[in-house]
Image (cartoon, rainbow, N blue to C red):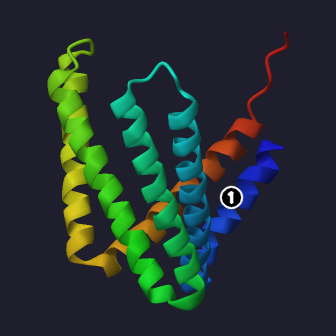
């Protein structure tokens, strides 16, 4: 099964070479649905989680509503104005990279439970994410190309690992 899945993933990695816009459109469609689901989960968890503080629960509902709105706008935009939906998606990716980068930098400076070399790597990763997000904000087209390349690399690596894993004998229990 790993072998077949690996081959499928590698074959999927070639699709952007032949159909880049369609692949990006599909990726944005899946991402908009994921953002919608995340919004619903945030709202439901914030409402039902009684042990969290009131301010945290309100914040969760607000984030959930914003995610729902963003997901709806991108989803509808794909069918009415694909260019705008694409730009919103790329700006969403840049925003996520920026927030994750800032969190990583803060984590690297404050998390004293991990070794110093690990903290340095976390800080470097955070800086790279912040720089990448700034580059995407400045040039959204390159951000779209970067997303396509990243997904392709991920599909190749994941597929290769699956194929490699298929040749490893299973341990008997």
Residue 74 coordinates in the image, percent (x, y): 51, 74
- Other residues around mark 1 within 10 Å, as few (<14) / some (14–19) / many (≥20): many
Q: Does 109 sit above or below residue 142?
A: above
Q: Which residue lies furthest to the front in this view?
A: 54
Residue plotted at (55% across, 70% down): 72
31 vs 76: above or below? above
The picture places residue 14, in percent across and down from the top left corner, at 62, 72
Asked which quadrant contains residue 21, the reply is bottom right
Instruction: Quarter of the image for the C terminus: give it.
Output: top right
Q: What residue sits 74% from the left and 30% below the top?
A: 168
Q: Nearer the viewer, residue 65 or 37?
A: 65
Q: Which of 28 and 66 is in front in this view?
A: 66
SS of the residue under disc 1: helix
Answer with left or right where residue 21 lies relative to residue 100: right
x%, y% of residue 80? 56, 90
Q: Residue furthest left?
A: 109
Identify the residue under disc 1: 9
Task: Identify which residue is drawn at 18% across, 33% down.
Answer: 106
Quadrant in the rendering for residue 144? bottom left
**Where 125 falls versus 52 (above or below)?**
below
**Where is residue 133 shown, x and y percent of the image?**
25, 61
Image point (68%, 58%), residue name? 9
Foreground pick, 13 / 62: 62
Quarter of the image for the N terminus: give it: top right
Relative to 41, residue 74 above or below: below
Q: Answer with left or right where residue 26 lies relative to residue 153.
A: right
| Mark count | 1
């Amino acid at each position: 099964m790993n072998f077949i899945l690996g081959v499928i993933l590698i074959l999927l990695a070639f699709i952007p070479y032949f159909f880049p816009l369609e692949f990006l459109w599909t990726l944005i469609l899946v991402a908009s649905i994921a953002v919608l689901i995340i919004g619903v989960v945030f709202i439901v968890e914030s409402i039902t989680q009684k042990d969290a503080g009131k301010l945290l629960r309100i914040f969760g509902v607000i984030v959930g509503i914003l995610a729902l709105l963003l997901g709806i706008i991108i989803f509808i935009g794909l069918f009415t104005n694909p260019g705008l939906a694409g730009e919103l998606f790329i700006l969403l990716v840049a925003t996520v990279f920026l927030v994750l980068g800032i969190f990583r930098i803060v984590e690297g400076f404050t998390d004293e439970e991990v070794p110093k070399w690990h903290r340095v790597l976390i800080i470097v990763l955070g800086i790279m994410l912040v720089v990448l997000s700034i580059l995407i904000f400045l040039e959204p087209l390159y951000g779209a190309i970067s997303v396509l390349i990243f997904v392709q690399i991920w599909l190749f690596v994941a597929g290769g690992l699956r194929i490699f894993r298929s040749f490893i004998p299973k341990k008997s229990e």
